[in-house]
Amino acid sequence: MTERLRETQTPGDTPPEALDRLIGAAADAARVLIGSRPWDRAHWLELVASRLDATADDLVPLAAGETHLGMDRLQGELKRTTFQLRLFAEILHDGSFLQVTIDHADPTWPMGPRPDLRRMLRPLGPVAVYAASNFPFAFSVAGGDTASALAAGCPVLLKAHPSHPKLSEATGKQVTDALAEAGAPDGIFAVAVGYDTGVMLVKDPRIRAAAFTGSLSGGRALFDLAVSRPEPIPFYGELGSVNPAFVTPEAGAERADDVAAGFVGSMSLGNGQFCTKPGLLFVPAGAGIEDRIAALAGERPVAPMLSEHIRSGYFEGLAKLADRPGVRVIAGEMTRAGDPAPTIFATTVPDLLADAEALTQECFGPAAIVVSYGSEEELLAAARVFDGQLTATIHGSGQEPVSAPLRDVLSERVGRVVWNGWPTGVSVSYAQHHGGPYPATTSIQTTSVGTAAIDRFLRPVTYQDAPDELLPPPLQEDNPWQLTRRVDGVLQQV
């Protein structure tokens, strides 16, 4: 996702003194949220979701006007946004996310007398969330980072993206009003604007974590600020990916048409402006997949990009790819005039291996490279070239000898391995993982999509030999919140 960290200053940027007040209010709210009950926070999220659904007729046209994305796409994205708010509310009702664990004192413990130990997760505190450009609902003001942080009990300072300012303001008002109506503490959520605002947020000592979806350059700049603070904080950055896809010889021989159609559909979805867009496709030489892809891509219409800034960066990326040795254009136009249609390049594995650093960089937009290989050894060698990615895809039968080694190589490099499908479309679910090794993300162990995203904004605390009346309710002996807990090693369901 290629937007730079530096943005144009506007008169609407949040003044430093106003930002200071917002952060102070968030810090005050954090102290209240520490003792809040999960089902109360669930109610807050449910009310936010309901309010966003009720104002869809106002919000979706705003989004369409600012982002050039279609109404159907945006309506679906808003539905995804409210669904994930409700899904986090569901796990709050469950309570298992707190990971409550109790070890009673045991003088006969094999490693020596054991004290009474009680462990649970608690919220980190105020969180800075940086909205994305390409998902104006699902990864923006009320998106997954906001939902998971609020679910964890962390106030959110949302740094709006400049590509959809009117939508950010309108969505922020709905979220703020819904939280106030639900009885959430003052200061639990606010929207702030401006480049300097983003820098001040990540550097402020009252901010305890940050979440970002955007470009490698912008995310890395913020990450460096986060970890260079006197007290470093977690920075959960999703920084982009080329998401390679691999077609085995058997799949290439049996399903060439399906593979070509699926690839073109996936790489051009949203005009190629998805972080999970497959940017490289490895195909067996002689299978005819290149020609099929070129023909299908040539039938795709032109479409506007999210912003002029992104459009300019896209054409710069095309020009760089076209200049690489051994790379040829098989579909699309290199002209910078007008809106882009899909552009497909082609090369071979030997040429890619000779120029891997240049040819494995993300080009944000409707562009991709089809890479032909001559042997399974070449296919595996190509897979080993990649650094951290969000996803990798395998199209195969599962019976071929190369399938398992290819799976193993890719599993070392990605957060999600897709089998006989395509990576665009990240289901919001319990088992989802949207992350990966650097540079796909800055935190290899965490996800930004799915219920496990709440873990980013929680930290463990153990209480030793504390009197029952001083323990948080989840750790008290009579279990007043009626939570599932692990007691003396045994999981006790309520």
Image (cartoon, helix red, strand yellow):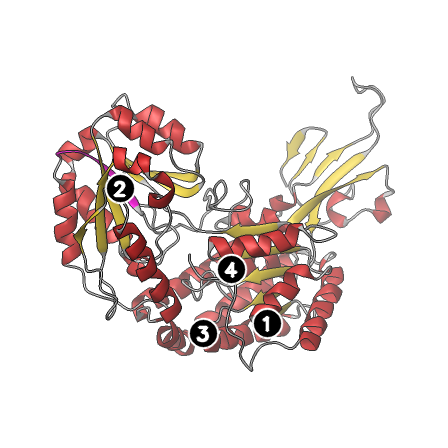
Q: Can you give x and y, in whole percent of width and height, for residue 377 in the image?
A: 28, 24
Q: Nearer the viewer, residue 373 or 174?
A: 373
> Looking at the magenta stretch, what is its main secondary structure?
strand
Q: Distance between the residues labelled 1 and 3?
A: 24 Å
Q: How far apart are marks 1 and 2 (CA)?
A: 40 Å
Is 382 drawn above or below residue 193 in the view shown? above
- Which callout, 4 or 1, points at the residue further toward the start of the chain? 4
Q: Mark 2 points at which residue?
A: 281
Label 3: state its secondary structure. Answer: helix
Residue type indicated by callout 1: Ala
Q: Nearer the viewer, residue 367 or 247?
A: 367
| In-image side of 422 versus 440 (left or right) | left
Asked if residue 368 lies in the magenta stretch, the reply is no
Comparing marks 1 and 2, which lies closer to the viewer? 2
Q: Which residue is drawn at 61% across and 69% down?
A: 197
Comparing marks 4 and 1, which lies closer to the viewer? 1
Q: Distance between the residues labelled 4 and 3?
A: 14 Å
Q: Name the residue under label 1.
A: 192
- Which callout, 2 or 4, points at the residue further toward the start of the chain? 4
Residue type indicated by callout 4: Leu
Residue 92 in sight from this viewpoint = no
Q: Which residue is drawn at 45% across and 74% down?
A: 54
Mark 1–mark 3 CB contact (< 8 Å): no
Residue type indicated by callout 3: Ala
- Which callout, 1 or 3, points at the residue further toward the start of the chain? 3
- Which callout, 1 or 2, points at the residue further toward the start of the chain? 1
Q: What stretch is highlighted in magenta?
A: 280-286
Is 109 drawn above or below residue 93 in the view shown? above
Residue type indicated by callout 2: Leu
